Image (cartoon, rainbow, N blue to C red):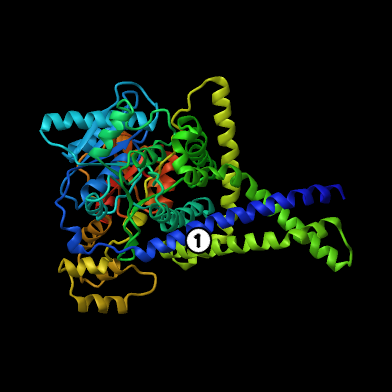
Amino acid sequence: MVLDHWVANLLAPLGFWVLFNAVDDLIIDFAAALAWLRHRSPTEDELDVPPPRPMAIFVALWQEHRVIQHMLDTNVAHSSYPQVEFFVGAYPNDALTVAAIRAAMERYPNVHLAMCPHDGPTSKADCLNWIYQRMLLHEEQQGMRFEMVLTHDAEDIIHPDSLRRVNYYAQFADMVQIPVLALQTPLRELCHGVYCDEFAEYQFKDMMAREIMGGFIPSTGVGTGFSRRALEGLAVRHGNRIFEPAALTEDYENGWRVHAMGLRQKFMPIRMEKGQPVATREYFPRQLGRAIRQRARWITGNTLQTWEFHSAAETWHYAYWFWRDRKGLIGNLVTPLTNILFAYGVLTLLWARAVHQEWGLAREAAHFSGIYLTGLGIQAGHTAARIWFSSRIYGWAFAAGVPLRVVVGNWMNCTATLLAVFTYTRAKMLGQPLRWVKTEHAWPNRAALLTDRKRLGEILVGGSWITQGQLEQALATCPPGVRLGRHLVGSNRITEQDLYIALSLQSHLPLGKPEIVSLPVSRSLPASFAREWRVLPFRVAAGELYVASPELPSDEMQQGLRRFSSLEPRFHLVTPAEFEELAAQFLPTL
């Protein structure tokens, strides 16, 4: 058969590619294992030895009014580091984002607006450069100096202990990279699950291997701390362009630049505390189209743009690492084809043997079966390792889906690579610049954010509303399907007001009946929806819709709100009695 002939001709090069790529990955496996054997986490006493360095956190924004206040409310209010200031960059033609930043500044004196002098969007790097200039002006005005600068995004959840650890490692390194991990989503969200698996493996293995083998550590763009020596060195070497404005992945570029200056880099190994990793957490794109666009930007910046930024003579010392990062241009395209052809060859071989025939493809497949089986055996080992890494962060039930998500990830990367090559080639042929391809950011809901929050019973006992004995009795007598709080109110152990104070503390939501409610705003949602979900809008500010509700916000409630309003909801707890008063006054009778 003609098809068999062409497939057979492809088996040899694809088989050698599978084997070569698998052996290359084995090098990283052994290096990572050695790195973990040599690793020793600092003790609590050692972490407290270096005095706290003043730190600045840079957040570059374009049309992020929906999430930036949530980010600042969470990370500013919950930070345990004593000397940290947030410099938030925005553009003059992004009024909603500017308003959101100014609203946060009214609440937090350590939040500062860094306005770019021109309209946007330009590139994230350009915005970061202007944030740096705003920080310098702040230093002049306040007579102080920041010793470390960290970059973060609008949807990042900064672990409360991460800055203390950055401060510790800053004694020895000029660039410190905090681990970055995706927040867990339901198993059905295969697209986001790919991010969970890939980042878990990359943080546990590749980053550790790069450091011990002397390679440069690419910044991930978030959770990266730079010393002032590093930033000032970058400014001198690159005409004050600390972050390369033309780069789509300025973070990757700066990782190489810092190492090329002879400065030490440090990846902060993942450490689990109370069952959660000390890492920057966030949601990555959860829709296929957005995920492919983001990956296309990464591929364009990390592989295609680096060819034009650096000559071979400039980067020969890092040839292996650039090869590692660029081989995805081939691997992402070849892997799905390899899977298809291998499956076709195996099925053909089995069929030929079953009917006692000698098909040409069967003979060819048999010739290369040793190469394929060796390569695929190594790849199977890598998949098993990814299952292990994923289980460390998300548990075994989630990790069981890794084999399926590997296949999904292969096709996502293949499509993203094709898009990256097309976009880059088109821009160069037309002489157009590659602009900031912004990723849509989603702020995690409270349940995802507060993974280590206390149970309601713990809060009630800790606040002396009930005793430990009363809690144990209530748990034992609580009917199925009845919430503990409602059971305690019904048995007169606590009042309804006590319950809602505890719920407010548990969920970090403000509590109390809003004093001002505008009638037009309160009618911005259909009355039937407002009564069904027990939500009442009462204010609009900085692109956000403030809603009062006696219910804790759920994913379903927020999805329902977004069907009727493009504004980002901000929740305010009220007691059921207070909600009924508001509903009687402002909701029309059905």
Q: Relative to residue 395, is residue 362 drawn left or right?
A: right
Tell me residue 109's x, y (percent): 16, 39
Measuring from the top left, give residue 191's x and y in whole percent.
53, 50
Disc 1 is placed on an element classified as: helix
Which residue is disc 1 drawn over?
386
Q: Quadrant where the C terminus lies?
A: top left
Nearest the viewer among 165 and 320 is 320
Closer to us: 222 or 185: 222
Q: Report if residue 312 is visible in the image.
A: yes
Residue 376 as seen in the image, left or right of residue 495: right
Residue 75 percent across, percent down from the top left: 26, 48
Q: Residue at x 48, y 60 (%)?
A: 29
155 with respect to 141 (left or right) = right
Q: Quadrant of residue 473?
A: bottom left
- Using the rendered view, name the quadrant where residue 448 is placed: bottom left
Image point 51% across, 47% down: which residue? 324
- Residue at coordinates 78% horizontally, 48% vertically from top-left? 9
Q: State the image coordinates of residue 449 (x, y, percent, origin top left).
A: 33, 54
Type of residue at label 1?
Arg
In the orientation shown, which residue stands out farthest toward the left?
A: 143
Mark 1 surroundings within 10 Å by alpha-carbon count, few (fewer than 14), some (14 through 19), many (20 or more): many
Examine the rendering and report whether any part of residue 100 can be seen.
no
- Viewer-closest of 67 and 367: 367
Which residue does the image show at 34% across and 34% down from the upper left?
A: 61
